[in-house]
């Protein structure tokens, strides 16, 4: 029998731990220098901040500062159509490059960036699925729910728009003081429109998905501290998507206890827990006939866990993106008197012509200035700032005459893309909806096609696009039909940070009723 004592170890040198302590850091330093030089060399022909050529520190620092939209726009202007922001990450502001990378039958596939959007550790959802074939299979199953063919999107949005308007009218109006009125009646009511926009989109998406709103509008407050939790989550999500090492740490089993969980008593986890209970009840009772997302997904054959993951995704992905579009468009309208007045005029004439309440989507689409306002609002602050990286095929590809090695990840710089002077004119920094109405039909169509890229392209087009456009059309018309708005602090209309999405807060307004 083998005995460890029989081994002759006398010929082995003694281990000097002090020497080893110096050797290991030295070996690590050599490895880091060699890998950094290799990272820099591989894409050395792509311009960008020097630190980003060999380290993820630059993009992480930019994201932590809440400055991604502004800084990436500045860097893209210096670099041209391709910008290097990290060792293996490129961004483009070229619509044609973006369409090619995202083409329905293209050879590009999703980078691990998408994996950081997974919240439920048991199951991927439509955004976090990395395998292209699996993504296509799932998208085909959920398509009818997202595009409204298998459910009543208009009815769901109409009910929340009505609730939203009625709640503003009953709680948040500043009444014009008339002779004989008390001081209280004429007092200023300060309203944080940034918070109202989030409550609106939360109630819309939960009504669309679960058949019942979660009650944020009715409560008029941040239920379960969801807002604070979500704003923290967005920062973590941005860093985790951008930095592969942090992504692996944050979403490792060791960190699972720190992520939002359906058993939490507050925050995002609490909201996801409520959602899971609703889904579970439907599956337990085998209720498949409801005209909402859960019903559609059940009829499409999704398992209970798949449905929980997919409907949970909607709360995260479809609230702050649309709320950000509503807030930023409203800020630009309130600081652009000609645009504000023209939209009010078009709304007033439509009301006089007898449009329904709430306005139908078909009626809204026939209002040219309203459509121009929506397109321009999306252009000024695209819901997704940057990212959504796809991996170049193994043989590499040539984009705008520049060879990109296989395995490189390329994403969009949407803020810069929406400042394309060749498409939108030289006044790209100005909110001017008229740009879509003063040009010929071909130029208008091209401008709208480019703005439409904020929802993605090809096989990766945002599945929730139909719901988002329905919300934007109805809510802007009805807000401007019923009310007048005025910024309380015109020199500082709101606080705005840019991570992977735009986040606005402290948007204080005065609301009066249209007479």
Image (cartoon, rainbow, N blue to C red):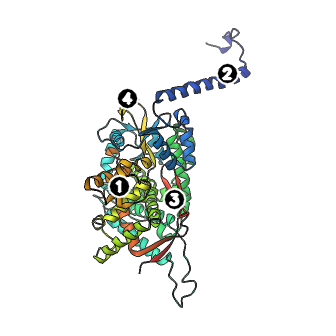
259 left or right of 396 in image:
right
- x%, y% of residue 146? 33, 55
Residue neighbourhood size for the residue with mark 3, other residues' Cα within 10 Å, grouped as few (<14), some (14–19), many (≥20): many
Residue drawn at point x = 38 percent, y = 72 percent: 344
Q: Earlier in the sequence, mark 3 or mark 1?
A: 1
State the SS at label 4: loop
| Image-quadrant location for residue 203 | bottom left
Distance, label 1 to label 2, CA atoms, is 56 Å
Q: Are marks 4 and 1 in contact (CB under 8 Å)?
A: no
The secondary structure type at the circle numbered 2 is: helix
Residue 205 image offset from top left, x and y in percent: 41, 60
The answer to whether any part of residue 199 appears in the image is yes
Residue 33 percent across, percent down from the top left: 58, 26
Query: How many angstroms separate mark 3 from mark 4 (CA)?
Result: 40 Å
| Marks 2 & 3, CB-CB < 8 Å contact | no
- Residue for badge 4: 394
Q: Is residue 399 above or below residue 183?
A: above
Q: Which residue is mark 1?
A: 465
Name which quarter of the figure residue 111 lies in: top left
Pointer 1: residues within 10 angstroms few (<14), some, or many (20+)?
Answer: some
The mark lying in front, picked from 3 and 1, is 3
Q: Which residue is mark 3?
A: 504
> Alpha carbon of mark 2 to alpha carbon of mark 3: how far?
50 Å
The reply to whether residue 264 is in sight is no
- Mark 2: few/some/many CA within 10 Å (<14, 14-19, 20+): few
Is tag 1's residue or tag 2's residue first in the polypeptide sequence?
2
Indicate left or right for 10 with 265 as reference: right
Relative to 98, residue 207 above or below: below
Residue at coordinates 30% horizontally, 42% vertically from top-left?
Answer: 104
Determine which residue is flagged by label 2. 23
Disc 3 on helix, strand or loop?
A: strand
Cα distance in 3D space between marks 3 and 1:
21 Å
């Amino acid at each position: 029998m083998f005995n460890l004592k029989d081994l002759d170890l006398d010929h082995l040198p003694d281990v000097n731990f002090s020497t080893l302590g110096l050797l290991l850091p030295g070996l690590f330093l050599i490895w880091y220098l060699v890998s950094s030089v290799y990272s820099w060399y591989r894409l050395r022909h792509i311009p960008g901040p020097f630190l980003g050529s060999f380290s993820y520190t630059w993009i992480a620092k930019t994201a932590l500062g809440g400055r991604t939209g502004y800084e990436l726009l500045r860097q893209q202007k210096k670099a041209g159509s391709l910008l290097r922001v990290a060792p293996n990450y490129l961004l483009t502001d070229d619509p044609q490059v973006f369409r090619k990378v995202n083409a329905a039958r293209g050879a590009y596939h999703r980078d691990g960036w998408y994996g950081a959007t997974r919240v439920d550790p048991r199951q991927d959802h439509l955004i976090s699925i990395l395998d292209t074939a699996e993504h296509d299979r799932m998208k085909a199953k959920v398509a009818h729910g997202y595009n409204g063919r298998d459910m009543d999107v208009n009815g769901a949005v109409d009910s929340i728009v009505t609730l939203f308007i009625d709640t503003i009218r009953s709680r948040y109006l500043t009444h014009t003081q008339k002779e004989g009125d008390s001081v209280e009646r004429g007092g200023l009511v300060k309203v944080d429109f940034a918070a109202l926009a989030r409550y609106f989109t939360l109630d819309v998406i939960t009504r669309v998905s679960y058949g019942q709103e979660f009650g944020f509008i009715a409560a008029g407050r941040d239920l379960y501290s969801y807002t604070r939790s979500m704003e923290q989550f967005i920062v973590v999500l941005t860093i985790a998507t951008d930095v592969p090492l942090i992504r692996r740490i944050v979403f490792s089993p060791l960190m699972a206890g720190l992520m939002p969980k359906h058993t939490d008593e507050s925050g995002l986890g609490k909201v996801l827990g409520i959602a899971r209970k609703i889904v579970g009840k439907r599956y337990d009772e085998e209720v498949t006939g409801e005209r909402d997302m859960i019903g559609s997904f059940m009829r499409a054959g999704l398992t209970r866990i798949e449905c929980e993951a997919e409907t949970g995704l909607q709360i995260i992905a479809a609230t702050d993106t649309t709320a950000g579009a509503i807030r930023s468009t409203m800020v630009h309208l309130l600081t652009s008197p000609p645009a504000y007045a023209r939209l009010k005029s078009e709304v007033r004439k439509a009301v006089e012509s007898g449009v329904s309440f709430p306005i139908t989507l078909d009626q809204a689409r026939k209002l040219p200035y309203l459509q121009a306002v929506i397109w321009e609002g999306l252009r000024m602050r695209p819901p997704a700032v940057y990212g959504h990286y796809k991996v170049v095929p193994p043989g590499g590809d040539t984009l705008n005459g520049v060879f990109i090695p296989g395995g490189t990840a390329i994403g969009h710089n949407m803020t810069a893309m929406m400042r394309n002077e060749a498409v939108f004119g030289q006044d790209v920094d100005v909110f001017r909806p008229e740009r879509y109405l003063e040009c010929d039909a071909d130029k208008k169509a091209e401008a709208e096609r480019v703005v439409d890229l904020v929802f993605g392209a090809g096989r990766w087009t945002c599945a929730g696009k139909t719901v988002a456009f329905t919300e934007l059309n109805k809510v802007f018309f009805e807000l401007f039909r019923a009310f007048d708005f005025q910024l309380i602090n015109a020199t500082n209309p709101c606080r705005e940070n840019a991570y992977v999405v735009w986040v606005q807060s402290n948007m204080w307004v005065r609301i009066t009723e249209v007479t």
